[in-house]
Amino acid sequence: QVQLLETGGDSVQAGGSLRLSCAASGFIGSYKCVSWFRQAPGEERGTVAALYTGGGGEWYADSVKGRFTVSYDNPKNTLYLLMNNLKSEDTATYYCAMDRGDLARKYEVLGGSCLGPPSAFDYWGQGTQVTVSP
């Protein structure tokens, strides 16, 4: 079983920056697909960025390209999301997620990215709130 713990959410003004962290603990084993999702009130949970922990497999939502950077530190088993030039529309609860391995094995064989729907991810963090004021 894997546990994910997110930190870093805060309230900032538009144009500011934040870095979210997601520390994974437990038995992780082989390389995985990891992802950041976000959900605003009344909206569906959507993918912000995704990454293969072995390197590559990156994917970004169009709305965050050029502003957000996803990375994974294997020795620390920690996923990061660096968010620059934040906008009010980035306000949401942010969740990190990790797959059990099925999505990662698919990426290893077919390439592409680690993009997947929420149902493709087996482990979730508790969520961290990001609020961007105009």
Image (spheres, rainbow, N blue to C red):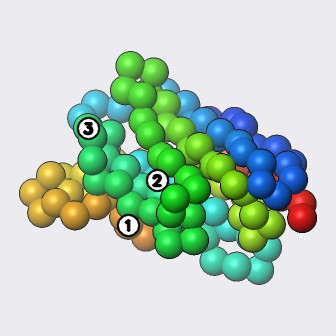
Provide residue 123's location: percent of width, then percent of height. Answer: 48, 48
**Label 3 residue SS:** loop
Regarding residue 102, the answer to whether it shows in the image is no
Task: Characterize the local packing of mark 3: few (<14), some (14-19) or many (20 or more) Cα atoms within 10 angstroms.
Answer: some
> How far across and down, in percent of the image, does residue 36 sit?
53, 54
Regarding mark 2 in the picture, which secondary structure is present there? strand
Q: Is residue 59 visible?
A: yes
Marks 3 and 1, how far apart in space? 17 Å
- Locate residue 109, reporting x and y percent: 10, 57
In three-dimensional space, the C-alpha distance between marks 2 and 1, rounded to whole angstroms, equals 8 Å
> Which label is found at residue 116?
1
**Residue at 15% in and 52% down:** 108
Q: Three-letter amino acid code at disc 3?
A: Gly
The residue pinned by badge 2 equals 35
Residue 121 image-quadrant placement: bottom left
Q: Position of residue 35 (x, y in %)?
A: 46, 53
For the image shown, how many numbered marks are present on the structure? 3
In the depicted structure, whether residue 75 falls above or below residue 64: above
Viewer-nearest residue: 14 or 50:
14
Q: Secondary structure at mark 1?
A: loop
Q: As drawn, is 5 to the left or to the right of 101?
A: right
N-term mark: 3 or 2: 2
Tell me the quadrant of the picture where the N terminus can be found: top left
Disc 3 to disc 2, C-alpha distance: 13 Å
Q: Earlier in the sequence, mark 2 or mark 1?
A: 2
Q: Quadrant of the image for the C terminus?
A: bottom right
Q: Dot 3 corresponds to which residue? A: 54
Q: Is residue 71 above or below residue 123?
A: above
Mark 1 is on which residue type? Answer: Gly
Task: Verify CB contact (< 8 Å) between mark 2 and mark 1.
Answer: yes
Q: Nearer the viewer, residue 75 or 59?
A: 59
